[in-house]
Amino acid sequence: MKNRLKVLRAERDWTQADLARELGVSRNSVNAIENGKFDPSLPLAFRIARLFGLAIEEVFQDDHVSS
């Protein structure tokens, strides 16, 4: 799944560790999500979207949907 997590995090000048702490997950989890190696659970995806004040679709996009 494609995502804008790295860009959103950088806009706030947060490290992966900062974001992980905010979300209650490991830094490795944040890294894996950012690099498309791990798709977050639905509850985690909603937490991420809420943290950035965005709709979930503004953070995550299905790989099979063309832009």
Image (spheres, grey):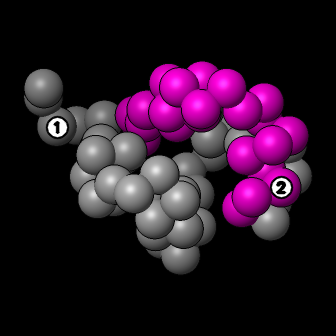
Residue 33 falls left or right of residue 62 = right
In the picture, the quarter occupied by the N terminus is top left
Mark 1 or 2, nearer chain start: 2
Q: Residue at x 86, y 40 (%)?
A: 17
Residue drawn 78% across and 35% down? 16
Which region is colored magenta?
1-23
Q: Position of residue 4 (x, y in %)?
A: 43, 32
Q: Which residue is mark 1?
A: 65
As drawn, is 65 to the left or to the right of 25? left
In the rendered structure, are the residues bearing label 1 and label 2 in contact, judged by CB atoms less than 8 Å apart? no
Q: Is residue 18 visible?
A: yes
- Residue 43: horizontal and vertical position, in percent? 53, 75
Give the left or right position of residue 3, taking residue 63 as reference. right
Of 50 and 44, the residue lying toward us: 50
Callout 2: SS: helix
Q: Which quadrant: the C terminus?
A: top left
Image x and y of residue 10, in percent: 60, 24
Disc assigned to residue 39: none
Crowding at dot 2, Cα within 10 Å, few <14 / some 14-19 / many 20+, comes out as few
Any magenta on residue 20?
yes
Q: Main secondary structure of the magenta part?
A: helix
Residue indicated by mark 2 = 21
Q: Amino acid at mark 1?
A: Val
58 left or right, relative to 26: left
In the structure shown, which secondary structural element does the residue marked by tag 1 occupy? loop
Residue 37 visible in this rendered orientation of the protein: no
Q: Nearer the viewer, mark 1 or mark 2?
A: 2
The residues bearing labels 1 and 2 have C-alpha atoms spaced at a distance of 31 Å
| Residue 21 drawn above or below residue 50 | above
Q: Residues within 10 Å of mark 1 (few under 14, many from 20)?
A: few
Question: Which quadrant holds residue 66?
Answer: top left
Q: Residue at x 16, y 37 (%)?
A: 65
